[in-house]
Image (cartoon, coloured by chain):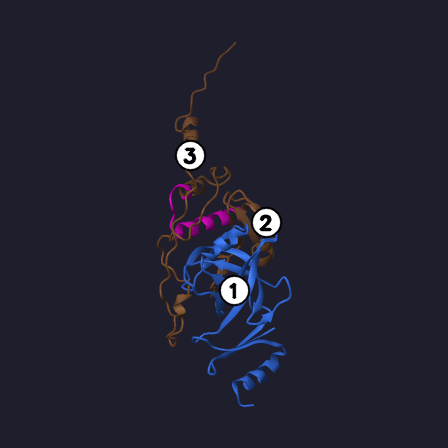
Amino acid sequence: MTFAVISEVPGYSRQAMFRGKEEALRHPTPALEPQSGMISKPKFGSSGEDISKTEPTMEDVPFSSGQKLRLGFNRPPRPWLPPRLRQKLDRVRRIQPKRREMVELIEEIAKISADFYQVKPGEFIAMEFDGRIVDSSDTQIDLLMRIQGKKFDTPVIVWEVGSETFSGWRT
Amino acid sequence: MGSWFGNLFRLENLTRRAVAVRKKYKKKSARVRIAGVIQNPQNMRQTPLDFECRIDTGFDGGIMVPHWFRSDAQSIGIEPSITNITLADGSKTPAYVCAAHIHKINGHSFSLPGKTAMLVMCGNRKGKLLGMDALKHCSVLFDGPKQAFTISF
């Protein structure tokens, strides 16, 4: 009869891994930083009226207290996401990210998810923050109507595959 | 007919559409009053939308409203989705979106459930915008010199 002793791999302590997980679970869901105010940028020089008031041009300053992006998940993200993204998500949960960080996070999750599920460019997808696609459609409105009112584990990100943004001022 | 209505009438004949809205500019911009709802299809609860907004042909979304409309949507059980949108200066920002039904544009009513448009909740300015998504399948005619516009469906 032989006995083998398996030594613990240095740097990959299970205890350390669980400690990090427990720490992440202990923290309550944070809110993102408040949204910035808009800067004045008149569109038409001739108009003395406050066109700039409705133009959403914003500086990259923290979110205002009225506009919080609450990430409702209590667990760390699912393990199939890359470690770098998991770290970012965990950071977003713990501290309030800036607007730019949030934009990058959404972009990365959307790109990884679209690549993983091999979604065709031009399709509109709705995914959770763990990258899992919950619905897809050919049009924005159809997608929004499908997911409207449904309950999901985490907030849902909507995205147009192959595009940089979902909507806005496209040139 | 020498009035601006007459000039617009001749142009509208070319499009062969029924003019639904004929208005002069207000505060030097084309503004319309819209009435509609955000509806939760799961429980059929609704929250009303009724405000004046400016027509923005550069905005490809439906309706752009300040961020505090999100709480209206949440009150009927809708958690708006998160996405990135492009702003007028070319930068990107996270925003909340959901679907809304427009019932009326300046007195012109749509048959139920109304015209479905994307509601973008972003920023903290009181001004609201009506974008191209809400104005698709209709023609908007701007008469700059006369400071007037028409919307035909």
| Relative depth, front residue between A165 and B134 | B134
> In the rendered structure, the residue with mark 2 lies on which chain?
A
Query: Which quadrant would residue A124 be assigned to in this image?
Result: bottom right
Q: Horizontal placement of B17 versus B27: left or right?
A: right
Q: Secondary structure at mark 2?
A: strand
**Which mark is drawn over residue A105?**
none
- Write down the residue under mark 3: A26
Disc on res. A135: 2
Q: Is residue A110 magenta?
A: yes
Residue tagged 1: B50
The reply to whether label 3 and label 1 mark residues of one chain is: no
For the stretch drawn in magenta, the main secondary structure is helix
The chain coloured brown carries which letter?
Answer: A
Q: Nearer the viewer, residue A81 or B10?
A: B10
Residue at image location 63% in from the left, 61% down from the top: B113
- The span picked out in magenta is A92-113
- Report x, y in % for residue A53: 39, 66
Residue kind at label 3, given as amino acid type: Arg
Q: Which chain letter goes with mark 1? A: B
Tell me what hue chain B is rendered in.
Answer: blue
Q: Is residue A95 magenta?
A: yes
